[in-house]
Image: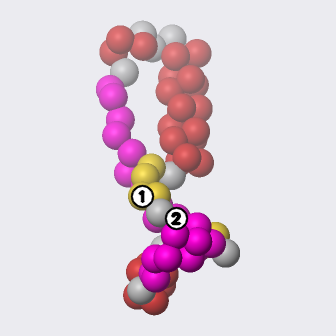
Amino acid sequence: MSYGANLLDAYRQAGVYTGRVLKGEKPADLPILQPTKFELVINLKSARTIGLEVPPTLLARADEVIE
């Protein structure tokens, strides 16, 4: 199970930063942004292998379930 920042959103933010630098802004003047989108991924196969039962309510909340 993993709960962390959405990588696609992080790459999009990196592109926005790159664009701002290429337009002439100084990197030192750019604000530090924290992730705003997070995702929950559950590897159900691994959970079963180690003997864990994942509650259906948690599975329903997951953004991605790996069978």
Query: Would residue 43 appear left or right of 62 to someone viewing this image?
Result: right
CA distance for labels 1 and 2? 6 Å
Which residue has dot 2 on it? Answer: 41
For the point 56% across and 76% down, which residue is it? 48
Which residue has dot 1 on it? Answer: 3
Is residue 28 depicted above or below 3 in this figure? above
Q: Which residue lies furthest to the bottom in this view?
A: 56
- Earlier-in-chain disc, 1 versus 2: 1
Quarter of the image where one finds residue 30? top left
* Rendered location of residue 1, percent (x, y): 47, 63
Query: Which amino acid, by three-letter code, is at mark 2?
Result: Val
Labelled pair 1, 2 in contact (Cβ < 8 Å): yes
Magenta residue check for 35 = yes
The residue carrying pointer 2 sits among few (fewer than 14), some (14 to 19) or many (20 or more) residues within 10 Å by Cα, namely some
Mark 1 element type: strand
Q: Residue 48 carries which label?
A: none
Quarter of the image where one finds residue 54? bottom left
Mark 2 element type: strand
Query: Which amino acid, by three-letter code, is at mark 1?
Result: Tyr
Query: Where does the magenta region start and end?
Result: 31-54
For the point 52% across and 70% down, which residue is it? 50
Q: Nearer the viewer, residue 60 or 24?
A: 60
* Rendered location of residue 23, percent (x, y): 55, 17
For the point 43% across and 52% down, which residue is it? 4
Magenta residue check for 45 = yes
* Rendered location of residue 47, percent (x, y): 53, 71
Is residue 16 depicted above or below 47 in this figure? above
Q: Which of 33 and 54 is in front in this view?
A: 54
* Rendered location of residue 16, percent (x, y): 53, 33
Query: Does any portion of residue 8 appear in the rendered image?
Result: yes
